[in-house]
Amino acid sequence: MKRVIVVGSGIAGLTAALTASAEHSVTLITKGALGMSNTRFAQGGIAGVMFDDDSVNAHISDTLAAGAGLCDAEAVAVLCSEGPASIRELVELGVAFDSHEGDFAKGREAAHSYPRVLHAGGDATGAVIEAALVERLRASSVTVYERTFLRDLVLHGGRISGVDLQDADGVRFRLDADAVLLATGGAGQLYPYTTNPSGATGDGAAAALRAGAVLADLEFYQFHPTALVTTGNFLISEAVRGDGAVLRDATGTRFMPDLHPAAELAPRDVVARGIAATMARQEGRPVELDATALGADYLAARFPGIDAAVRAAGIDWSREGVPVAPAAHYWMGGIATDLDGRTSIPGLFAIGEVARTGVHGANRLASNSLLEGAVFGRRAAMAIAGDLWRPAHFEGALVASELRPLGTTADLPPFSRSALQQLLWASAGLSRSADTLTSVSRILDGWSALDLPGETVDNLEDRNLLALGRALVTAALARTESRGAHTRTDYPATDPGRAAPILLTDDRAVRPLDSTFSREALPC
């Protein structure tokens, strides 16, 4: 029996913990209260081939198309072929998906060729999944530490030996482990406008970066096109557009049909950039999501959570448009893994949004993220029974410039989380260029050289965000093309020769050994 630590309590972490607990001693660490995760806030659904007139090949094709040439085809095949079994397992664990005439209710979201998206509670899919898995976890043998912060990974002899933690009272302590599974989610707090909760500060990715793990695709951050323009950037699910809502500019004119054949159902990066460009033409005014054709009764029944939030903001969306704008939503990049969640550090696994499994490529297909958490959470937990001395090996990537030496601290603007967020929004947001990226990189380098004060969780989160922001900018500078969610105004075309991931570690870029990206698990 191995000692396993799972850090994170979204669908990936909960699935892994429950699966691993059948054979191992499992401890789950969560920064907040159990059940508070990005999963809980997922309004959209979970995509899977659950209907006879759909096919795994069609799901694979849609995923690869959305990924803009950067998906790992083998990982996508695993996701789409194992997805149906993972969804059935969620049903067995108590997840009640919405039904229609005795079968799963079908939902359509952007860039899917078939309405294969399942929902629960209308627009509360993530909350329903989270509640069911938490209930099972509390009844299991898993030991849970709530309100416990991951400070760092502990290594011994080049492999994982435990985690360095801090509790809500500021007490620092260590837990030993044979294997650590990071399921800490994304880092939406890199930006001032995000659909992510306040705890999404990239703690697992930053800890892995400091430990020397290989990270990949950090330049690809997906911005959700339709966040409600109010405090909190409440997400208006893509499913609303999937059901027929349209986007209009300040004059009431639909603009997406002129930008893409799929109009409002184009890939998210296309819609987000279309909204941003339209907002720029109308002096920053948000665009409007027009769902009036769906009617009040349908909106309330199909999207009860969104309906309540929109009406609480004083908007009757059955009669008027909803002001929306893009917001940071999902990081396609993360800790590079193999097909079983192994990282480049023996004994360390990564699953969910913190991981770069290769299934999302340059632009995540809607509703594949919950599926990824379930599929790869289970695969990683099963892999723990194997040889923990086998790291994942990565080769054949494009070469990023090395993480730059720390620069001068003279003439720096004062550091704050807000200042960091505004810099990244302006320079590494929906569009980038060498000039803006180079300018902000000098500031990030200078801030990184400072001895930032404090040992509170807020201070530690700020350090994590700064480290990840610096890595993101490095990767964005290195990708001299536009692809998926990464748009360079100085390199507007997609370069077929650059259809490979950029790999980074804390102190150097990982140089390619050949021209084709590959990965495999090798002995140390």
Image (spheres, grey):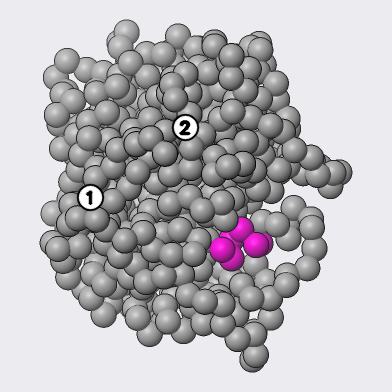
Q: Which residues are magenta?
A: 462-467
- Labels 2 and 1: the sequence-earlier one: 2
Question: In the image, residue 514 lies at what x, y percent?
Answer: 19, 55
* Mark 2, secondary structure of its residue: loop
Which amino acid lies under the numbered mark 1 shown in the image of this protein? Phe
- Mark on residue 389? 2
Can you say whether 456 is above or below 154 in the image?
below
Task: In the rendered view, tell whether residue 364 sits above or below residue 480.
Answer: above
Residue found at x 62% / y 41%: 156
Q: Is residue 298 magenta?
A: no
Local packing at callout 2 (Cα closer than 10 Å; few below 14, some 14-19, many 20+) is: some
Q: Give the residue type at disc 2.
A: Trp
Report the side of 361 relative to 494 (left or right). Answer: right
Where does residue 174 sit, x and y in percent of width and height? 75, 38
Residue 356 picture quarter: top left
x, y percent for residue 205: 53, 50
Disc marking residue 517: 1
Q: Which one is in front, 58 or 101?
A: 58
Extreme bottom residue here?
Answer: 411
